[in-house]
Amino acid sequence: MNTPDTPASTPVDRGVVIARSVKLSTVWAIRFLVLVATGAVLLWLVAQAWVAIFPLIMAMLVTSVLWPPTRFLRGAGWPPVLAAAATLAVALAA
């Protein structure tokens, strides 16, 4: 591993080569630990927010499923509140 500017008799200092490799490994290990810690924090935040997110998702699902019958009843002349209440009562009974 002689370069043009070094004489052929110059030995390679293994300590320098090993220190460079250890330093590089340390930098990559720190990057990996930062990514793992960030992922853990994000998962914890999602778990904490799930208490609020899950009911919203379920409410949107129920609303989107019950909208067509409610729209039909409103088109048939039912008042909006009565159409929504009747649709919800039938859905809960089913």
Image: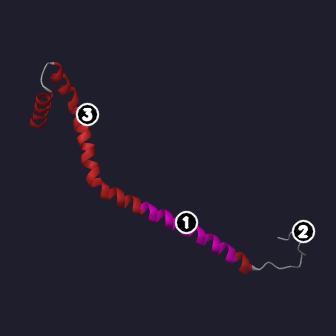
Q: Earlier in the sequence, mark 3 or mark 2?
A: 2
* Quadrant position of residue 6: bottom right
The residue to which callout 1 is attached is 31
Residue 84: where, in percent of width, then height?
15, 31
Q: Which mark is residue 64?
A: 3
**Horizontal side, residue 85 vs residue 64: left or right:** left
The kind of residue on which mark 1 rests is Arg
Instruction: Specify few, some or many for label 1: CA neighbours under 10 Å numbering under 14, 14-19, or 20 or more.
Output: few
**Disc 3 versus disc 1: distance between alpha carbons?**
44 Å
On the image, which quarter does residue 9 sit in?
A: bottom right
Q: Quadrant of residue 79?
A: top left
Residue 8, image x and y in percent?
89, 75
Element at label 1: helix
Q: Residues within 10 Å of mark 2 (few under 14, many from 20)?
A: few
The residue that mark 2 highlights is 4
Residue closest to the eye, 37 or 4: 37
Q: Which mark is residue 41?
A: none
Q: Is residue 46 above or below residue 20?
A: above
Q: Earlier in the sequence, mark 2 or mark 1?
A: 2
Using the image as rendered, state which of residue 30 and residue 4 is in the foreground.
Answer: 30
**The residue stretch that appears in magenta:** 18-39
Q: Is residue 94 visible?
A: no
